[in-house]
Image (tube, rainbow, N blue to C red):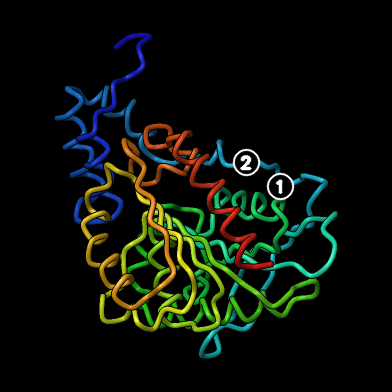
Amino acid sequence: MDNETPKITQAMINAYDEYTHLSLDRRKFMERLTQLAGSGAAAAAIAPMLAASGAKADIIPATDDRLTTQDVTYPGANGVTMKGYLARSKSASGALGGVLVIHENRGLNNHIKDVARRIALEGFNALAVDFLSPNGGTPADEEQARQMFTNLDAAGVAANGEASRAYLAGIQGANGKVGAIGFCWGGGTVNNIAVKSPNLNAGVAYYGAQPKAEDVPSIKAPLMLHYGGLDERINAGIPAFKEALEKNGKTFEIFVYDGANHAFNNETSAARYDKKAADLAWSRTVAFFKKNLA
């Protein structure tokens, strides 16, 4: 393997997905990756390519002079103080729609803040929410952050999502309309908020877990749902969700990107990022928000 880029297989990507979302711990993941890669050295070289790299997080620099950004706190549900990162365009005129940006199961990191800046440059007030706020906020250690998600309950998350929506709808320069975009855990959270919050104006879920069919009648917001074609774990829930949405006359669009993996939108993960799928999904997302949040 000297001077060669390690070959990453779908089995390796699937093992990483199981590690980050299901039953594998770090030791078992590395054991499986070693088996798949053929050696410990190869596994050690491949693991960082599967993971997200914070060094690649800033597509739009935090210092971009087109934007005003700030860390904010605001009232959550049940006395919780929520933390977030607010991004707005300096050149935007008139009242703007808002977009909640909801993180993966790593918490509010630099990549998600970067997504908020991208959303702001498209003409929205963007609030990247830290849903680990009830537990003190997102820690620097990604492994610790993932473990903290096991202490969150869906009802509390949805309540804090609604509180975040209300806060963003009421800030200076807002037009009162708020949508949400989320990725992985955040995609599932968008679906959950859509079930629980009748005032959400639009929801975009990237490879997010689907709500129960019996909860779909409560959804009021139009939805845009993006899935990677190779993401068997999440995609198993598409048929039942689609059937329930159709049965209940909901407004929705579903896009499945052939050959793309779970987390295909995250350019900080070299092995799973799919630029073609990400760019197409993003253009659809921006158009969807401009239609529903104006």
Spot the residue most to the left: 35
Residue at x-position 62% and y-position 41%? 58
Quadrant where the N terminus is found in the figure: top left
Closer to the camera in the image, 287 or 57: 287
Asked if the residues shown at circle 2 and circle 1 are in contact, with their CB atoms under 8 angstroms apart, the answer is: yes
The residue positioned 33% from the left and 41% from the top of the image is 261
Query: Looking at numbered disc 2 in the image, what kind of residue is underneath it?
Result: Asp
Picture disc at residue 62: 1
Q: Residue 224 carries which label?
A: none
Which residue ends up furthest to the bottom in the rendered image? 78
Relative placement, left or right, of 64 versus 83 is right
Q: Is residue 263 visible?
A: yes
Instruction: Looking at this view, name the residue that lies furthest to the top.
Output: 3
Q: Describe residue 188's horizontal placement relative to residue 38 as left or right.
A: right
Residue 257, percent from left and from top: 36, 42
Can residue 106 be seen in the rendering of this structure?
Answer: no
The quadrant where residue 98 appears: bottom right
Residue 79 point in image, percent of width and height:
55, 89
Q: SS class of the residue under badge 1?
A: loop
Q: Quadrant of the C terminus?
A: bottom right
* Number of other residues with Cα within 10 Å of mark 2, as a class: few under 14, some 14 to 19, many 20 or more: some
- Name the disc covering residue 58, or none: 2
Q: How far apart are marks 2 and 1 (CA)?
A: 7 Å
